[in-house]
Amino acid sequence: MDDYRENMAEDFMTVDLTGVKDREGLHDRIQEALPMPEYYGRNLDAFYDVIGEYGSGWKIVFRGCGELRETMPAYIGALERLCMDAEAENTGLFITFED
């Protein structure tokens, strides 16, 4: 999306991870729910770069994380740590995870 910055004023964005089975599915859901640029690389480093650059004012809730905690614990754990780091660097960014 070329003009995705116009959509960044969203007050509250939900990424529903219910039923997600793999990394590809997780990044599909991120792209569906968040105003990601076309160049989004569909990996954790790329996600970190985007929320670091454009995430000020974003409030993101990852819902339905329980299944991923069982099937992909290392990856969802890495995503949570990455989000905590991004929040620490960007006081305008809020991210939470719900089972």
Image (tube, rainbow, N blue to C red):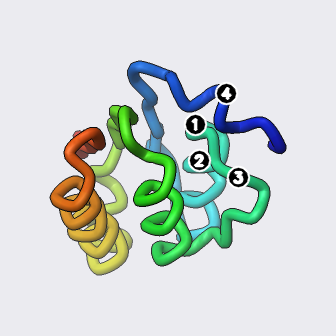
- Classify the position of the C terminus by image quarter: top left
Return the mark for residue 37.
3
Furthest-top residue in this view: 11
Return the mark for residue 98.
none
Does residue 99 appear in the picture of this structure?
no
Point out the frontmost of discs 3 and 1.
Answer: 3
The quadrant where residue 38 appears: bottom right
The residue indicated by pointer 1 is 33
Q: Label 3 crowding class (10 Å Cα cut-off): few <14, some 14-19, many 20+?
A: some
Point out the frontmost of discs 2 and 4.
Answer: 4
Pointers 2 and 1 in contact (C-beta within 8 Å): yes
| Kind of residue at disc 3 | Pro
Query: Is the residue 78 above or below the residue 65 in the image?
Result: below
Pointers 4 and 1 in contact (C-beta within 8 Å): no
Q: Residue at x 34, y 32 (%)?
A: 59
- Classify the position of the N terminus by image quarter: top right
The residue indicated by pointer 4 is 6
The residue indicated by pointer 2 is 29
Q: What is the secondary structure assignment of the residue under circle 1? A: helix
Of residues 8 and 81, the one nearer the viewer is 8
Relative horizontal placement of residue 98, taking residue 13 as reference (left or right):
left
Q: Residue at x 66, y 40 (%)?
A: 32
| Kind of residue at disc 2 | Arg
Of residues 75 and 42, the one nearer the viewer is 42
Of residues 70 and 52, the one nearer the viewer is 52
